[in-house]
């Protein structure tokens, strides 16, 4: 039952606003998406690094560096992705995808529908 819930949580489709089932939690967090001409999601530092290396992501600045002295670091940042702008984004830097998957799953379960 838990595995079924995880699959639905991360890969089940939901609407980004127009009623069409066109997004998933995985897409939002790990891949990123464009919504109303702006970048939405895109919280994975590994994908960010790889796309920046290819010249697809243009990093502008950071506006918050998390409270920890060691990794992972939480970073607030601004960037453009394939011509679309992300005014305020956040990502863990130095964490594994498994860590992020587990943490975001816990947040989703513990605080449904809340920030």
Image (cartoon, rainbow, N blue to C red):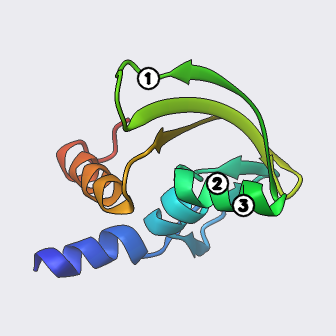
Q: Position of residue 48 (x, y in %)?
A: 64, 54
Of the 4 image quadrants, the one containing the N terminus is: bottom left
Q: Position of residue 10 (x, y in %)?
A: 37, 69
In the image, which is nearer the foreground, mark 1 or mark 2? 2
Asked whether the residues under the numbered discs 3 and 2 touch, taking CB atoms below 8 Å apart as contact, a structural biologist would say yes
Whether residue 17 appears in this view of the structure is no
Q: In the figure, residue 90 lies in which quadrant?
A: top right
Sequence-earlier tag: 1 or 2: 2
Mark 2 crowd level (few <14, some 14–19, many ≥20, 10 Å Cα): some
Q: Secondary structure at mark 1?
A: loop
Q: Which mark is residue 49?
A: 2
Q: Which mark is residue 66?
A: 1
* Position above or below: 70 against 79: above
Mark 1 crowd level (few <14, some 14–19, many ≥20, 10 Å Cα): some
Q: CA–CA distance between discs 1 and 2?
A: 19 Å
* Residue drawn at the location 60% of the way across and 73% of the way down: 22
Asked whether the residues under the numbered discs 1 and 2 touch, taking CB atoms below 8 Å apart as contact, a structural biologist would say no
Sequence-earlier tag: 3 or 1: 3
* Position above or below: 115 against 52: above
Q: Which residue is mark 3?
A: 51
Q: Secondary structure at mark 3?
A: helix
Q: Position of residue 16 (x, y in %)?
A: 60, 60
Mark 3 crowd level (few <14, some 14–19, many ≥20, 10 Å Cα): some
The foreground one among 2 and 63 is: 63
Q: CA–CA distance between discs 3 and 2?
A: 6 Å
Of the 4 image quadrants, the one containing the C terminus is: top left
Q: In the figure, residue 60 lies in which quadrant?
A: top right
């Amino acid at each position: 039952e838990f595995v079924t819930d995880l699959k639905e949580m991360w890969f089940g489709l939901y609407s980004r606003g127009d009623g069409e089932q066109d997004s998933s939690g995985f897409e939002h967090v790990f891949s990123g998406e464009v919504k109303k001409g702006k970048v939405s999601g895109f919280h994975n530092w590994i994908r960010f690094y790889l796309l920046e290396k290819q010249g697809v992501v243009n990093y502008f600045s950071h506006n918050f560096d998390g409270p920890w002295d060691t990794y992972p670091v939480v970073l607030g940042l601004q960037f453009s992705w394939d011509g679309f702008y992300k005014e305020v984004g956040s990502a863990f830097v130095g964490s594994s995808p498994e860590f992020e998957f587990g943490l975001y799953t816990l947040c989703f379960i513990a605080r449904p529908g809340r920030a």
